[in-house]
Amino acid sequence: MDYGMSNRLSRVMGPGRAVMLAVDHGYFQGPTTGLENLRRTLTPLIPYADSLMLTRGALRTSVDPEERVPIVLRVSGGTSVLKELSNETLTTSVEDAVRLNATALAVSIFVGSDNERQTLANLSGLVDEAEGCGIPVLAVTAVGREMNRDARYLALACRVAAELGARIVKTYYCEEFEKVVDACPVPVVIAGGKKLPEKEALELAEKAMAKGARGVDMGRNIFQSSDPVAMIKAVRAVVHDGVPAGEAIRIFEGGKVPPAP
Ligand code: 5RP
């Protein structure tokens, strides 16, 4: 592996485990709860994130160029929640990603959907170009509305992503998650999914790490928390320090800003 690729991968994955903060939701659902004012939500979280996953528009407007946090740039999209989500194209060129100093690029694939071929072509075409610049591609295995998030499906989707050249795969946690990880030759990180009570989200991270995930790429369960900074600190304790969820919840509760009298 060339130096640039190795360096970027290590910047995103850290010493082997990663807490990536996903704030790219606006690219298909507009002003998502918690991200209405992206800069306000994001700024206090940046010191605790190993990387940020977001679009170029969000990066330019809401992250100061002096920040040193690695950027995983979301480069697929082109459809909103009002239409068929799987009908994605590439929305940002590799040239612009280089200009923005992206550390990695993120693209969704919709295995099993009517747009499977198109989204897999998005991934493989992007890999061809990004690898030439030493930039790793992270594939997000999105799930079609009709798909089950079970180990059989997610293992298939993650393996396809890795075979097409993704250097990191982001997927959902499921029962028998170890089968998904075992069949995927590149690091797997999990999405948090819909907002859960904080303890349950920490348990999700704990289980995923125990079953071989290399980290989380979590969004709503952090930025929609009643205290996002306390929550990301608790998630870090689980992912980086192996703190059980039952103890990490105390980090969350201890860090909570008390309600105004
Ligand atoms: C959408 C994404 C989102 O960034 C991701 O799913 C967000 O994470 P979370 O589910 O934790 O809010 O990649 O395809």
Image (cartoon, grey):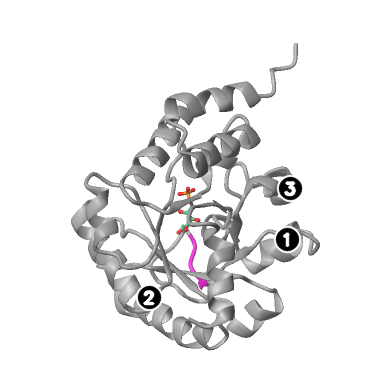
Q: Main secondary structure of the magenta part?
A: loop
Residue 41 in the figure: left or right of residue 202: right
Position of residue 253 relative to residue 149, above or below, is above
Amino acid found under the numbered disc labelled 2: Thr
Amino acid found under the numbered disc labelled 3: Thr
**Image quadrant where one finds the C terminus:** top right
Label 3 neighbour load within 10 Å: few <14, some 14-19, many 20+: few
Image coordinates of residue 15 in percent, x first then y, are: 53, 57
Which marked residue is nearer to the observer: mark 1 or mark 2? 1
Looking at the rendering, the stretch of residues picked out in magenta corresponds to 76-80
Q: Any atom of ligand 1 within 8 Å of the CB at mark 1?
A: no
Q: Which residue is labeled 2 in the image?
A: 119
Q: Which residue is labeled 1 in the image?
A: 68
Amino acid found under the numbered disc labelled 1: Arg
Residue 135 visible? The answer is no
Closer to the camera in the image, 130 or 121: 130
- Sequence-first disc among 1 and 3: 3
Q: Quadrant of residue 155?
A: bottom left
Q: Are marks 1 and 2 in contact (CB under 8 Å)?
A: no
Residue 156 in the figure: left or right of residue 38: left
Closer to the camera in the image, 149 or 229: 229
Q: What is the CA distance from the residue labelled 1 to the residue labelled 3? A: 12 Å
Q: Is residue 118 magenta?
A: no
Q: Quadrant of residue 123?
A: bottom left
Which marked residue is nearer to the observer: mark 1 or mark 3? 1
Q: Which residue is labeled 3 in the image?
A: 43
Residue 217 visible? The answer is yes
Q: Any atom of ligand 1 within 8 Å of the CB at mark 2?
A: no
Q: Residue at x 44, y 45 (%)?
A: 192
